[in-house]
Amino acid sequence: DNMLTLENAKSYLKIDFDDMDQDIANLIMEAEAVVFASTGILAEEVDKSNNDTLKNLYNITVKIVLKNLFDEKEINGARLRAFYLKLKPLYSRYVNGKL
């Protein structure tokens, strides 16, 4: 399972205490929702995929969104748009059975 877990998220955000676990779990869901709103990509579908390229790109994108949400920064900046543009065709090929 390659999806972003609470432990992975905490490690990525460099948080080594438990006080914010619920907040971070909520941020993971929010980050996935932001990626979905921007790309139409469902976390559950990516999770079911056997395509590592898709999973890795999705997870990197979710991590960037998560960090931006955590830092209260822009969630639709140029860097993220570039990831969204890469993700969409990969996901389309996956859901259309080509990957």
Image (cartoon, helix red, strand yellow):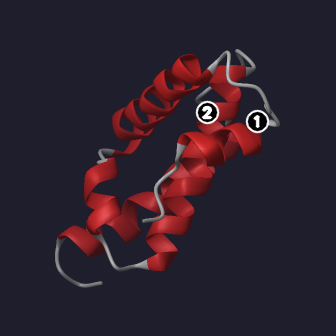
Establish if 88 lies above or below 28.
below
Residue at left 26%, top 58%? 45
> Which structural element holds mark 1?
helix
Q: Position of residue 17 (x, y in %)?
A: 76, 26
Q: Nearer the viewer, residue 82 or 33?
A: 33
Q: Residue pushed farthest front?
A: 18
Q: Residue, x 24% and y 84% (percent of image)?
A: 98
Q: Is residue 38 left or right of residue 75?
A: left
Q: Position of residue 23 (x, y in %)?
A: 56, 17
- Identity of the amino acid at label 2? Leu
Query: Which quadrant is home to the N terminus?
Result: bottom left
Secondary structure at numbered mark 2: helix
Q: Which residue is mark 1?
A: 13
Q: Is residue 74 visible?
A: no
On screen, residue 67 versus residue 14, left or right, reads left
Give residue 74's position: percent from left, percent from top: 67, 22
Task: Locate the C terminus and report the quarter of the image it occupies.
Answer: bottom left
Please tell me the numbered disc located at residue 66.
2
Name above or below for residue 67 compared with residue 7: above
> Which residue: 35% across, 39% down?
36
Rendered residue at 17%/73% (across/down): 96
Q: Categorize mark 1 by other alpha carbons within 10 Å: few (<14), some (14-19), many (20+).
A: some
Res. 24 image quadrant: top right
Q: Is residue 33 above or below residue 93?
A: above
Q: Are marks 1 and 2 in contact (CB under 8 Å)?
A: yes
Label 2 Cα neighbours within 10 Å, binned few <14 / some 14-19 / many ≥20: many
CA distance for labels 1 and 2 = 9 Å
In the rendered image, residue 83, in percent from the top left (x then y), is placed at 58, 53
Question: Hey, which residue is sitting farthest left in the picture?
Answer: 96
With 36 as the anchor, is 25 left or right in this view?
Answer: right
